[in-house]
Amino acid sequence: MAELAVVLATYNEAENLAVLVESLEGLGEDLELFIVDDNSQDGTRAVAENLSAKFHNVNIINRPSKLGLGSALRTGLSAALATNARYAMTMDADCSHDPADVPRLLEAVRGGHADMVQGSRYIQGGGVCRWSIKRRWFSRTANFLYHLAAGGPHEYTTNFRILSRRAASVVVDRARGCGYDFVPESTLLVMAAGLTVEEVPITFTGRLRGESKLGMTEVIKGVTFFLVIALQYRLQLGRFSRSRSANLPAPD
Ligand SMILES: Nc1nc2c(ncn2[C@@H]2O[C@H](COP(=O)(O)OP(=O)(O)O)[C@@H](O)[C@H]2O)c(=O)[nH]1
Ligand SMILES: [Mg+2]
């Protein structure tokens, strides 16, 4: 059983995946990797198979079609929980998240003060590179609205995070979002379950190669969906958190 199960959702990441996996393997941490690929058309699957042949801890979950980032992360987190790994991590597979930051996130979660430790761009010491002004503006505005609506952390849209087993179970059991909306929703679910979220500053470097799959429809859908569940969360916090937290698995 590895200490940390890493979930990498991939859709057309053939040019980025090997760079990322080689860096993760070079960290010297105790990892088990799960690549969840949605029938990418650019040869990602072949890259993943080569990596799996090279590294015994690389597992591949092939899905028939593009079912959405959230759906892929949920599938990967379920597989991570099934391994009995102590923690589960998600990160983008396009090299936007620096593997060199993983030990800092891991150190923070090992400290035991939080059930979810996330790499945040929008706290002191964090930042963003290689992003257009427009993309920065969207991201900042969405996070400002999310923070205003739900309180909690300064960032809700980071997919670079480590979850304890009980936080991962909460997310797998309760999240409804299948696309990018899954990311802020899961932060909210972890908070609603009465679990603590800690933020560690990261510099987000933007994708190495290829195109972003985040479209405007996803952005609008994501913001609307979040604001609705944030309101629900605000209105029903007591009921929502207490009735559900009774079913939580025991702490690690
Ligand atoms: N399996 C799977 N992965 C996805 C899907 N959509 C996005 N991804 C992956 O999710 C991560 C973030 O996507 P990206 O396009 O970089 O979004 P951005 O960073 O917000 O621009 C990348 O690793 C993508 O390959 C999907 O429908 N299925
Ligand atoms: Mg990206």
Image (spheres, helix red, strand yellow):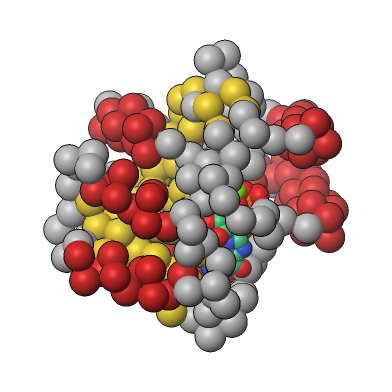
* Residue 54 figure quarter: bottom left
Whole-percent x and y of residue 160? 48, 42
Looking at this view, name the residue that lies furthest to the bottom. 64
Residue at (50%, 27%) from the top-left corner? 202
Counting the numbered discs, the total is 0
Whole-percent x and y of residue 189? 57, 49
Whether residue 6 appears in this view of the structure is no
- Tell me: 69 left or right of 105: right
Q: Is residue 139 placed above or below 198 in the rendered structure?
A: below
Q: Nearer the viewer, residue 181 or 241?
A: 181
Whole-percent x and y of residue 115? 39, 39
* Residue 53 figure quarter: bottom left
Q: Quadrant of the N terminus?
A: bottom left
Residue at (43%, 79%) from the top-left corner? 62
Residue at (47%, 54%) from the top-left corner? 16
Residue at (69%, 35%) from the top-left corner? 131
- Tell me: 147 left or right of 118: right
Q: Is residue 19 placed above or below 238 in the rendered structure?
A: below
Q: Nearer the viewer, residue 172 or 183?
A: 183
Q: Nearer the viewer, residue 46 or 27?
A: 46
Whole-percent x and y of residue 41? 57, 77
